[in-house]
Image: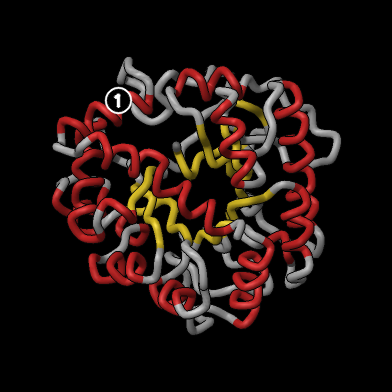
Amino acid sequence: MDTHLHVDVDMGSADAENPKIDLARAIKKSGMNAIGMNFAVDYVDLTEKGQAFDRFTNAMNAFDKILEENNLKRTLTDADFKEHLKKNEPVVIQAVEGAHFLEGDVSRVQIAYDRGIRIFDVFHDEHANPSLGDVFGKPQVYGGLTDLGRETIREAERLGMVVDITHASEKTILDALQVVTKPFLLSHTALLSSLQSEENPLAPFFEMRYISEELAKKIADAGGVIGVWPQITETPDVYAKRVRAMTNVVGTDHVALGSDSKITPAFDERKKSFNPAPAYKNHVWTAVGDSYYHSIVVALAKEGFSKEEIYKLCGGNFYKVFEAAGK
């Protein structure tokens, strides 16, 4: 399973003409049987009240259509998860990245749940208005998690959503650890130490997105599962070393895969058009001929992980979080 990947749709208007997206084929080509299907509404400046919620609604309507056209169903419960796997059907778990659509109204968490959201990444690149807490890469002006952020996390947990705290600042994460009562996600990051050891010239531009070993340990101690991010890794083998670095710190029970990539064609908000390129067989390392999932399994095995450990890393650990969220 990839816990965090994107399926792009046009959120700009209710009557947007989205192209037919062959999601079922893309999932099959990836070699996976489970995905966290994600979107975010803050790719444009949210300048008007209601804009974020409208974009959220437009996206959910588009996803409804995509799933219908692909004869796919959202996985809403643990029972659904097991049933879809039993029938050899893909597990599609709807996620949203950023609570901007709340616009300060926590009752909208219920709306998101009713629409099928089961992974709620409370933060994204831009602060929500009002803010739920400081995010990385922005001025730290809220002192960590806000009262709205605390209330939102509690409501998401009450309803049975998996809480994801990626994109939060370190202080916000530490505050959130005092609020969560169930296993949770940090779906796409990696260790700062592993990034620095790779000697990649792009590393300085990505450092703010990575976490320290000390913070990783605190996340694991609080019951979190950390999705390792493959950004700027050139091969699955390099990625496997990132996974190894993380498991050396928190153990194999607290690590998952989180590519934060696009499994289907990308939408350019500026040009209001879709990249016509088809979904790649490998949606992260396009030069690798093998499927995404199989290439990772091979690399993890070469890195020395056992079959049982690979099972945990490639979906088992996420499943435990998903199962716990629904209880």
Amino acid at pointer 1: Ser
Which quarter shows the C terminus? bottom right
Q: Quadrant of residue 53?
A: bottom right
Badge 1 element: helix
Q: Is residue 293 left or right of residue 70?
A: left
Q: Is residue 320 left or right of residue 273?
A: left
- Residue 80 visible in the picture: yes
Q: Quadrant of residue 63?
A: top right
Q: Is residue 198 above or below residue 155?
A: above
Q: Residue at x 43, y 70 (%)?
A: 169
Q: Which residue is mark 1?
A: 295
- x%, y% of residue 68? 76, 26
What number of labels is visible? 1
Which quarter shows the N terminus? top left
Q: According to the image, what is the colour scheme of the structure?
A: secondary structure
Residue at the right extreme of this rendering: 15
- x%, y% of residue 125? 52, 58
Q: Residue at x 76, y 48 (%)?
A: 115
Q: Is residue 62 left or right of residue 231?
A: right
Q: Is residue 82 above or below residue 151?
A: above
Q: Nearer the viewer, residue 75 or 234?
A: 75
- Residue 39 visible in the picture: no
- x%, y% of residue 286? 37, 23
Q: Residue at x 25, y 71 (%)?
A: 214
- x%, y% of residue 162? 56, 57
Q: Residue at x 66, y 45 (%)?
A: 76
